[in-house]
Amino acid sequence: MHANDRIVLDHLDRMTDSTGLVQHAIYGIPRRESGYTTDDNARALRLGVRLWAQDPEEQMLERVSTYLSFLEFARGVGRGFHNFLSYDRRWLDAEGCGDCQGQAVRSLAEVLGSSLPDGYRALARELIDTVLPTLADLRSLRAQAYVVLAWGRLWSAGVGDIEPLEAVAWSAARRLAECYARAVRPDWHWFESRMTYANAVLPHALFVAAERWPKEDFLGIARASFVFLDHQTTAEGVFWPVGNEGWYPRGEEKASYDQQPVEAATMAEAALAAHRLLGDDRLLAIFHRCHGWFHGRNSLRQPLVDVQRGACCDGLQASGVNRNQGAESMLAYLTVAMGSADARYALDAGRKTPAAIVPPGDMVAE
């Protein structure tokens, strides 16, 4: 773990009320008018469950209860989850987007695959069963990737009676592979004709699928696309993600800004997943580069995090750091801070030190 990385939840608690996690902040103050999203509360739930597994104390269980209760409230009358809730607790959408469904089921899988009290896990299974028909109809590639990651969590935890979700995950993984086959070009090893947001979840999902179905072509696609993504998001020795001011269409210039914390977090998680599967320490260098992005090893040489409160700024703009500290940014940072302990453990288990790791730019997809 980074010398300055401690899992401090002061900002998380400030942004959370009895309903759930508020979506945005003005500087470090909750922006109530922004309301709440299922996306953010799902991310907070997944983090809370992982932290509870490390230290099962009552305050963490209370946080988990709040975020799980939010997801139960978000269950729609028909299929799927709502996403946008106003501050006065009115749902603002008829049904949430596909990514929301994927984020929700991924967090519920974290609950179901944990050792939380029976009622928590029973509710998580009930909500997963409820959303299954919606998951089968998802069209968003990232949403399908989240479904694969959700199923992978349950499979690795040895949870039984998950065959219906496995069938959906299998179809989702095949869909990712098919999209890659259609979009790939000699100079473009990617799933779509442009890179947008949360890009690393796509190869991440196929690394997970490759572990379960090693006879398929998932591993080759995961490696090739992840190496390509690493090359496209490394510049001047730092992690330099695709900015959301125009994204990165094939054959055009990559948008340099607005760089978002979610990009560093998803890339870091994918690197750790790939390392667990492949055991290649060069992948840990990718994790450390993403981790360093939060602490000032970025294109602006400016830190984004307040480690004393567990807060994170909302991104890097060409003009400087966006000083607002919203929920998604905070959770991205806390997720990577947790992952740094996993990376350190891998190094301590007889592997190289970070200084000796071969730069990931030297990786070659097989």
Image (tube, helix red, strand yellow):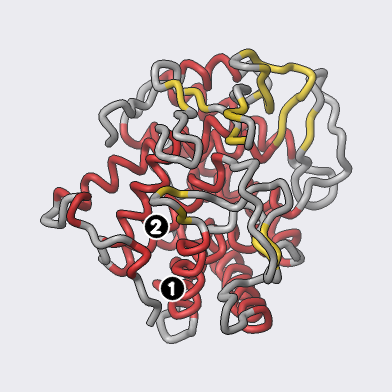
Q: Nearer the viewer, residue 217 or 159?
A: 217
Kindly indicate the quadrant of the structure image that contains residue 116: top left
Q: Nearer the viewer, residue 122 or 190?
A: 190
Instruction: Look at the picture and state if 286 lies above or below 94.
Output: below
Q: Is residue 37 left or right of residue 214?
A: right
Instruction: Look at the picture and state if 217 lies above or below 341.
Output: below
Residue farthest left in this picture: 350
Amino acid type, residue under disc 2 in the picture: Ala
Secondary element type, mark 2: helix
Residue visible at 67% across and 78% down in the picture: 183
Q: Is residue 302 left or right of residue 115?
A: right
Cα gap from disc 2 to disc 1, whole angstroms = 11 Å
Residue visible at 15% across and 57% down in the picture: 351
Q: Which mark is residue 223?
A: 1
Q: Position of residue 300 (x, y in %)?
A: 50, 36
Residue visible at 68% across and 21% down in the picture: 19
Q: Which mark is residue 271?
A: 2
Q: Nearer the viewer, residue 71 or 189?
A: 189
Marks counted in the figure total 2
The quadrant of the picture occupied by the N terminus is top left
Q: Nearer the viewer, residue 164 or 310?
A: 310
Kindly indicate the quadrant of the structure image that contains residue 257: top right
Q: Are marks 2 and 1 in contact (CB under 8 Å)?
A: no
Q: Is residue 1 left or right of residue 212?
A: left
Residue visible at 57% across and 84% down in the picture: 186
Q: Position of residue 159 (x, y in %)?
A: 44, 58
Q: Is residue 161 visible?
A: no
